[in-house]
Image (cartoon, rainbow, N blue to C red):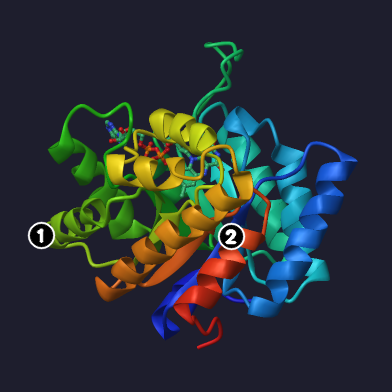
Amino acid sequence: MARIADLLAAGRTASFEFFPPKNEAGWLSLGRTIAELEPLAPDYVSVTYGAGGSTRTRTADLVSWVRRQTSITPMAHLTCQGHTRADIRDILINYRAEGVENILALGGDLPVAADDHAPSDYRYSIELVHDVIEFGGFSVGVAAHPELHPRSTDRHADRGHLAEKLRVADFAITQFFFDVRHYVEMVDELTSLGVHKPIVPGIMPISNLGQVTRMAHMSGAEVPAWVIERVAKSGDDLDDAERIGVDVATEICAALLDAGAPGLHFYTLNRSWAARQIVANLGLRPTT
Ligand code: FAD
């Protein structure tokens, strides 16, 4: 196992993100996906955490499964909205006992149906970052939004809050985006704030334009017209759409690596094909 801070210090990383499946068919399918990605020797994989703790057990189960049954280093996402400090402590005790060494510390959002008055000791992710660091034993990452957090109306304040997180955390992973300039501008703005921690771009290969456009809208990302036009050329041919999506993502990844990105983090949606093609197209050697 390894700490992601050390992996990033050693060289460029390639990593994959999964969500914990809801049913047995989903677990079987994800098992196949992980078996297909493991030969690429990913530096780490990460497992999402449902809003307000809605996947608390399933996230922990998947992280532990990766830790015990594969050769891959896992990172657990953890959100703080809707949690008490005692909840967070219990979760961290469990991860430490399992030998998990990496946490992505997030603000999260309460589930839509959640009681607004559910007990929460946290408001912002920075509070969780401090608690995880104080608990000890974890390399800690945070979320970054190149096109600003969707609720943010003030660029300067949003970058300031990100800088505040990165002064204490080890690294950031970004929300997905399609225009490399957003990433480069964010890194430049953080540099001017005196922050030089690694910021790993999150890559979303497009297979279904409608689905990705909806997700982009929710996360405050823009799908540029050139991307829509390229993928739309596939018409109703889903295989062709996925192939074009891989070509687009490969171009974006190549530009990001040219711009000095310290690694690439792929949003897989629990599927391996697109991520495998992109890694092959880039000629990435996953082990450095
Ligand atoms: P914060 O850092 O708390 O920021 C949220 C907003 O508050 C921003 O607008 C920020 O500018 C503002 N803010 C921050 N600090 C302050 C302050 N001190 N004072 C005033 N304003 C402040 N969500 C999930 O539910 N589960 C997941 O597994 C998950 N994984 C993710 C992985 C990545 C790589 C990314 C980029 C996002 C992920 N998210 C996940 C989504 C994330 O939880 C949401 O975007 C959430 O709304 C904000 O999270 P954050 O960590 O950026 O929050």
Q: Return the residue nearer the eye: 261 or 63.
A: 261
Tell me the element at label 2.
helix
How packed mark 1 is, by other alpha carbons closer than 10 Å (few <14, some 14-19, many 20 or more), is few
Q: Is residue 60 left or right of residue 245?
A: right
Furthest residue in direction bottom, as rendered: 288
Q: Label 2 crowding class (10 Å Cα cut-off): few <14, some 14-19, many 20+? A: many
| Circle number at residue 249 | none
Residue at 28% x, 58% y is 167
Residue 57 image offset from top left, x and y in percent? 77, 41
Residues 259 and 237: in front is 237
Quadrant in the picture for residue 268: bottom right
Left or right: 70 with respect to 51?
A: right
Ligand 1 within 8 Å of disc 2? The answer is no
Quadrant placement of the N terminus: bottom right
> At label 1, which amino acid type do we have?
Ser
Residue 95 seen in the figure: yes
Give how far apart the Cα atoms at labels 1 and 2 are.
35 Å
Left/right of residue 52 with respect to residue 249 in the rendered view: right
Say which residue label 1 marks: 192
**Quadrant position of ligand 1:** top left
Q: Secondary structure at mark 1?
A: helix
- In the rendering, at what x and y percent does residue 224 appear? 29, 41
Q: Residue at x 44, y 45 (%)?
A: 231
Kind of residue at badge 2: Ala
Q: Earlier in the sequence, mark 1 or mark 2?
A: 1
For residue 257, above or below residue 149: below
Whether residue 98 is visible, yes or no, is no
According to the image, label 2 marks what residue?
274
Q: Quarter-wise, where is residue 24 in the image?
A: top right
Residue 237 in percent (x, y) is at 60, 43
Q: Is residue 18 above or below residue 34?
A: above
